[in-house]
Image: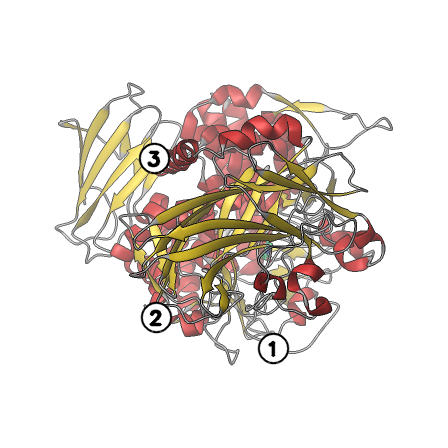
Amino acid sequence: MRYGYFDNASKEYIITDPKLPVKWINYVGGLYFGGFVDHTGGSLICKGDPAINRIVKYIPQLPDSDFKGETLYIRIKENDGYKFFSPFYVPTLDNYDLYECHVGLGYSRIISEFYGIRADITIYVPHKSDRVIRDIKIRNLRNKPVDIDVIPVVEYTHFDALKQFDNNDWVPQTMQSKAVYEENGLITITQFAFMRKNSSVNYFTSNNSVSSFETDRRLFLGNNGYGTWACPISLYNDELSSYEALRGDNICALMHHLGQMDPGGEKRVITQLGQCENVKEEKKIIDYYRNEENVDKAFSDLKSFWDKYLSTLHVETPDEDFNTMVNIHNPRQCYITKNWSRYLSLYQMGLGSRGMGFRDSSQDVLGILGNMPEEGCELIEKLLQVQKIDGSAMHQFNPVTMIADEGDARERQDRPKYYGDDHLWIVLAVSTYLKETGDIDFLDLNIPFYDKNKDGLPLENGTVMEHLQRAIEFTHDNIGQHGLALLGFADWNDTVNLPAGAESVFNANLYGYALLEMMDIARYLNEVELARKYQNYHETMKNAFNDACWDGEWYIRYFDKDGNALGSKNNDKCKIYVNAQSWPVISRFAPADRAKKSLGAVYKYLNTSKGIKLSAPGYNGYNPDIGGITTYPPGAKENGGIFLHANIWAIIAETIVGNGDRAYEYYNQINPVTKNNNIDEFECEPYVYPQNILGDEHPQFGLARNSWLSGTASWAYQAATRYILGILPSLEGLILDPCIPAQWNGFRVTRKFRNAIYIIEVANTAHMSKGIKTLIVDGKKIRGNIIPIYDDGNEHIVRAIM
Ligand code: IFM
């Protein structure tokens, strides 16, 4: 509680101390326009592609005391001259009487009190719009009138984020700012870089008249360029220089004299930061958002969007931390990862050609299909377009240009050029979409494969079903000496890169799980032969796996090209990997006795009080034959770190074997909400899952990094809702198969599914973990545990007894 608290009524997390160990952020807008806002008001905003269309300059490596991107100064006229400070704490670092950053759904609101002035600033991108609104309300808390100026500032970047750093002559020469004066005293400052590939300009404006402005950073900071953001010398002058910079570090500062404010008086300034083709043409929309009522409406529309998004599923369990995460923060993170993939965060700056990951987005989409199937379907269609004719997939792609590449595999000539898992994830994405929506016709949609002819046109199209079948056949045809799926450049674990011929237990099991999904689809379509074929494939891989991979107490993880095992008791390092134990349960490859033993080994050798380590013990020193895993110290990231994504699969595996207590223990120990009391150790936001936590081999055990954009979000949501609470959409109906801690007396869920609302009450007076004894829907007893599809827009009351 040292730094803040959850306020579930407002669906916010409220930060109460700006001096957090690291910046905490929130997302505004989407990939079309938006980015993130940090808890001290800084922001990184882009339009479209973050690599080549940045608007403001955000360099995370700079000290936390420097603002980045955007800030605000408030200036008070005192007897002895001007006093100014930032209501965001950064960059002036004054003593505050109150500071709150409300991290809301799609907005951040910073409320602060300094020197008897209350500032209340809400920052957001109106839903589907392309501008950042900063709605600034200033109130005089003093008992005498006060003269107040408000000076919002943005610092622009060159649009090409990498160029900003590597060409320090050309870039500054291309930056230009120009003022557009309007009759009513309003001013819009446009900023553009000449070499921009299109003619668009950035603009910054407000709804109040501006008496002067500054566009040159050096002039704003003053002292011949040696002024600081903490104390810009130009703010000691009545007016800014109104200089229109033709080069250099372009900023935009707008001087607003709000005049005398009486005690209790309040004034409002609304700024807009955006990008458009032509400001004159944009003026109508700019004017729209200068109007306070329109801005209020935009904010309430944003709230409605989120209310609707969250209304798909609401849970009431005996665990408040579980409810907080599942009802608010986890689904929000799912939406953000779906939008941004691994494109833009404090850890991924969207540079180079990283773009969206095929594997990542295929998993991210699983987390939002219940809430927004249409948007999910759009993303799935994009992903299918980067699948190749041979069934494998390109590793990453730019969603704007749809140009794809092989990721890190490009850089290693001595390694395979494809990732052995990518293409299999899309099977899960499509089948989850079908199960959620029943939109079976989607399987007939024609979608091009990625391979192009010399004119850049697709060489071949295939139906969605053909895409899926080719994905399966690709793995079926790429089998190693033990009959297991080949590794390719890597599987889910990017960092183990073995020479060609290596086999991957992960890929074998992901293939097994994908086959189960294909069997469901084939059976639903009445394709008996196809279902039988996949059943045989499943059986064959299962046998090969069990013949080759059992190590006595757990399953091994890889075979190298010479048939040596990795992840075995005979290795010195990385003797056991969690994914090699959880996935055989998920794929239904592991027989009950082995499942029990291998999951027990996870608990014994990999579990810690802060989460399950990916493997143990860690490598200690770089080994190019193995790959990136050996570049980390023991206990970090893939080298024995607590990789949260993989923790979730262990939770799911435990629910499959019916161990509700352990599944819940695992869930709870990584639930970020539970870290709120221990932020000095954890450091990251307690309202989102980070990708990794340092493991117990590392001296900073418990420290989290890479928050927000992680596959953990989507899988954690699935683990909580589909596996622990057991509300699992299927082609035939809504399966109810909870696996909960035995101590729970039950729980309640409201779930929208196929145009009906299911109000589900599960009673657990017998204190079981798994197994529905009685199921009653709308007063009628039902055999089995599948709740029918009603598709009637009505509420249906489901009562279950465990
Ligand atoms: O699976 C990968 C993911 O694609 C990118 N981040 C790391 C994960 C584990 O290596």
Where is the N terminus found, in terms of image quarters? bottom left
Q: Is residue 758 visible?
A: yes
Inter-mark Cα distance, 1 to 2:
42 Å
Q: Tell us which disc is closer to us: 3 or 1.
A: 3
Q: Which mark is residue 312?
A: 3
Check disc 2 and report its element: helix, strand or loop: loop
- Label 2, residues with CA under 10 Å away: few <14, some 14-19, many ≥20: few
Inter-mark Cα distance, 3 to 1:
48 Å
Q: Position of residue 180 (x, y in %)?
A: 66, 37
Between 581 and 58, the residue placed more toward the observer is 58
> Quadrant location of residue 569?
bottom right
Render colour scheme: secondary structure
Between 109 and 474, the residue placed more toward the observer is 109
Residue at 27 percent of width and 29 percent of height = 757
Disc 2 + disc 3, Cβ < 8 Å: no
Q: Tell us which disc is closer to us: 1 or 2.
A: 2
Q: Earlier in the sequence, mark 1 or mark 2?
A: 2
Q: Earlier in the sequence, mark 3 or mark 1?
A: 3
Residue 389 drawn above or below residue 79: above
Q: Is residue 658 visible?
A: no
Residue farthest bottom in this picture = 699
Q: Is residue 710 left or right of residue 388?
A: left
Identify the amino acid type marked 2: Arg
Residue at 55 percent of width and 29 percent of height = 285
Q: Position of residue 64 (x, y in %)?
A: 55, 68
Identify the amino acid type marked 1: Asp
Inter-mark Cα distance, 2 to 3:
33 Å
Q: Which residue is mark 2?
A: 2
